[in-house]
Every structure is written in C-alpha cells, then in structure tokens.
Image: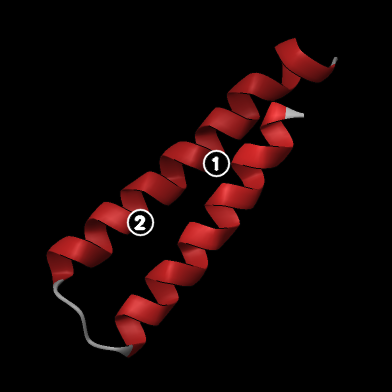
Amino acid sequence: MISMVLFALAGLLIGGVLQLVRSQATKFSIGITAVLAVLAAAGGFAWWPSGEA
C-alpha cells in the first residue's frame, strides 16, 4: 500500500518537473523537485519487497 502511494507521489512530482520546465522555472526548483521524485520512486521500490511480498 505504501509503495503505491510513493509511486503515485513520484508520478505527481514528475508531472511537476515537466510543468516547471515548460514554465522556465529556475534550475534549482526543477532540480529539487526532480530529486524528490527520484527519492519517492526509490522509496516505492525499497518498500515493495518488505511491505507487499
């Protein structure tokens, strides 16, 4: 369950990165959002075996 939430959060954050790139936001804000998306996806993969196996 938690891994699904983290994957959903990663998807929302990736969409946010795309919107930030389109609106020509600062590289810092794009980078922070991208890092958070990667961390959410990594957390989803890390949680998957222990939480839903």
Point 26% across, 66% down: residue: 30
Where residue 38 sits: x, y (%)?
44, 45
Q: Position of residue 26 (x, y in %)?
A: 14, 74
* Label 1: how many Cα within 10 Å (few below 14, some 14–19, many 20+): many
Distance Cα–Cα, label 1 vs label 2: 11 Å
- Compare residues 34 and 5 and report the one nearer the observer: 5
The colour scheme applied to this rendered structure is secondary structure
**Quadrant into which the C terminus falls:** top right
Q: Which of marks 1 and 2 is nearer the N terminus?
A: 2
Direction from residue 29 to residue 2 in the image, left or right: right
Residue at figure coordinates x 32%, y 81% from the top left: 21
Task: Name the amino acid type tagged 1.
Answer: Ala
Classify 8 as above or below 14.
above
Mark 2 highlights which residue? 34
Disc 2: CA contacts within 10 A as few (<14), some (14-19) or many (>=20): some
Instruction: Tell me: 45 left or right of 26.
Output: right
Q: What residue did someone put label 1 on?
A: 41
Residue in the picture at 49% in, 63% down: 14
In the displayed image of the protein, which residue is found farthest to the top?
50
Q: Which residue is drawn at 35% across and 56% down?
A: 34
Amino acid type at circle 2 is Ala
Residue 17 versus residue 19 in the image, above or below: above
Picture layout, residue 29 above or below residue 43: below
